[in-house]
Each structure stands twice: as structure tokens, then as C-alpha cells.
Amino acid sequence: MTRAYRAELVAYQSEPEARMYHLGDAFGLAAGEVQGWARERALCVAETLGDDDEVAGVFRDWSGEAARDETRRRLENGEPLFRHHVGRDCAWELTLRPVPVTGDRSGTERREERSHGMGNR
């Protein structure tokens, strides 16, 4: 069995109605691929939120954590990384995790969402 990796960024909101904002995801055969995506996406969200925003600071921290060698080692050893923060009337969640896939490496494809907006997906 081949191991692949997935990263996802989601925001949940309960008021004025329950909503989920899918802020992007990535899938790849190397942990570094999804780590790079998670780092860049977290920085993009932080930039959108602004320099003095508390949640933006959390995203900057997450971007650094996503890119660490220790995070790569954990992913390659089968351990997921889940980060959660509540702020700006949303619950924010970043996940990086290993995904078992069937077949050989030539039978899998890399997928990355290229949307840069923060709306529903």
C-alpha cells in the first residue's frame, strides 16, 4: 500500500446560520507537498485577515508549524496534525494527515485546489 498525504483548511460558523467554509485542500504522494501547500495557504489567510488580527497570528504560527521537519517526520510515521482555533466568530481548523491509498505510485494523481477566495466551496 502506498501512503499519500492530505491537507485541508476549513472554517465553521454558527451565526447567523450554520455554515462551513472550505478554504482549500491539497493531496500528494510526499509529505512535503502538502506541508508546502498548508504553509502557503495559512499565510494567505493571515494576509487576508490583516497584520493586527489575533486569528491572523494563529495562522502565521500554523504556517511555521506546517513546514517543520518534525511535522514531516510525524506525517511519515502515520501521525496526523490537527490544529483548531476559535476567533472572529468562526472555528478554524487545519489538518495534515497521512492517507492510505491502494495501487502503486503510478496509479495515483496529485490534486490541489487553486482557489484563493475565502467563500464557500
Image: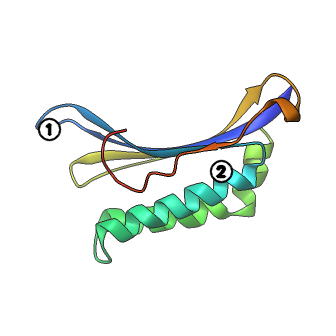
Q: Quadrant of the N terminus?
A: top right
The image quarter containing residue 120 is top left
Residue 15's label in the rendered image is 1
- Binning the other alpha carbons within 10 Å of mark 1 as few (below 14), some (14 to 19) or many (20 upward) gives few
Nearer the observer: mark 1 or 2; the answer is 2
Q: Could one spot residue 96 in this view of the protein?
A: no
> What residue sits 57% from the left and 62% below the top?
39
Instruction: Give coordinates of residue 109: x percent, y percent.
Output: 73, 37
The image quarter containing residue 121 is top left
- Binning the other alpha carbons within 10 Å of mark 2 as few (below 14), some (14 to 19) or many (20 upward) gives many
Q: Residue furthest left?
A: 16
Mark closest to the chain's N terminus, 1 or 2? 1
Q: Which residue is mark 2?
A: 34
Q: Residue furthest top?
A: 102
Left or right: residue 12 compared with residue 70: left
Instruction: Give coordinates of residue 98: x percent, y percent.
Output: 70, 37
Instruction: Give coordinates of residue 75: x percent, y percent.
Output: 73, 45
